[in-house]
Image: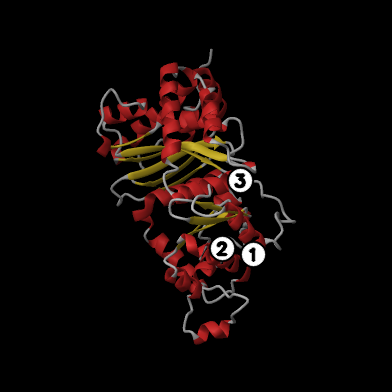
Amino acid sequence: MFVSCTSLYSLVGLWIDAGSRYENQMNNGTAHFLEHMAFKVSLSKKETFTDLAQKNAPNWTELEIENMGAHLNAIHQENRLYIMQRLFKDLPRAVEILADIIQNSTRVKLRLNVREESSYVRCKKWRLSTGVVFDYLHATAYHNTALGRTILGPTENIKCGGISHDELHDLAKYHFGNLLPTYEGETLPPCSFTGSEIRVQDDKMPLAHIAISVEAVGWSHPDTIPLMVANTLIGNWDRSLGGGVNLSSKLAQITCHGNLCHSFQSFNTCYTDTGLWGLYMVCEPNTVEEMMHFVQREWIRLCTSVTEGEVARAKNLLKTNMLLQLDGSTPICEDIGRQMLCYNRRIPLPELEARIDLIDAQTIKDVCTKYIYEKSPAIAAVGPIGQLPEYNRIRSDMHWLRQ
């Protein structure tokens, strides 16, 4: 568990090194359920449930947070993060509420709320195709493991600034000092990657949504930085960006010139011990096959013929993106908490930039070959995907003649 605070909007975050990654098939959805518990009811040691009922405040935690002018949010998969924005003067009460949420929440009639949300997401899934595709991608890439299960669970399971760092430390020690720093029990469940696919054909949808990935590495692996640069080399594009021969992404140049897709986005999703490196695309039904061909061809190019000039540009862009992603108190808080859980320290930006500067074209070729050549990808596709090549054909295109 780690408590962090940032300036700007005076934000406090509570990180817990546990999330849906620690669930099994029987209790899948527990982390999501606990989020609802945190938002709906918290029973402090000073008040009983009867006291709260007499106040006619079934959503006591939510109500008090709103009365403070604060906002509470939660994120959970491999870790759970509770974030609260509030005024500087409310720091002691904010930490107290977070402690109360985590340690004293009482289960109430929330199963119905969670079940309704889960049903809503599934009923509206075609309007939320990006999230659905990535759920399917995790499901096929990590068969029968925690990372392969949706956060919602099945329906049937239901840098310090404006404040004193010492003050925050004392508050955290007071409210959380009795908690063990680590869980004395089961370690992080292993999640094995499986090259496979999930296809959900729906010709009523106007566009095909497809994600393809290979297994990558966790946050602390030395190949993470080269894969981040490679991810930046491929980049992202959509029709609103226009196009031309001067686009930094070679794939974007091809895509724009050939009108092959509405958009694409490369991704590099890292967990503690594994990751997914790949690309998500949205295509017209009649361009799916050609777009997949050029995506795989671009992967091969990274392994065989990427240039020093391209890599230098990608490194500069990656550094810029890292700074832009820290524009705001919430992303800064997330960055502090994640790095503390992963590395037991926050890596300074100059150190990260120095690691990026060490990457050259040969590094990109070697690392990409390591994770792409002869590997079986994970594929998730939803919509009018009749032209999507068969899996064995896509798998065979992960091979090329090597000198």
Give the mark, 2 or 3, whose residue is nearer the N terminus.
2
| Tag 3: amino acid | Met
- For badge 1, the amino acid type reads His
Q: Amino acid at mark 2?
A: Val
Label 3 sits on residue? 340
Mark 2 to mark 3 CA distance (whole Å): 19 Å
Label 1 belongs to which residue?
Answer: 175
Q: Nearer the viewer, residue 203 or 99?
A: 99
Say which element carries label 1: helix
Label 3: few (<14), some (14–19) or many (≥20) C-alpha neighbours in 10 Å: some
Mark seen at residue 95: 2
What residue is at 45 percent from the left and 22 percent from the top? 311
Label 3 residue SS: helix
SS category of the residue bearing label 2: helix
Is label 2 in contact with label 3 (beta carbons under 8 Å)?
no
Q: Is residue 294 above or below residue 219?
A: above
The location of residue 349, given as percent across then percent down, is 52, 35
The one nearer the camera, 159 or 325, is 159
User: Of circles 3 and 1, which is in front?
Assistant: 1
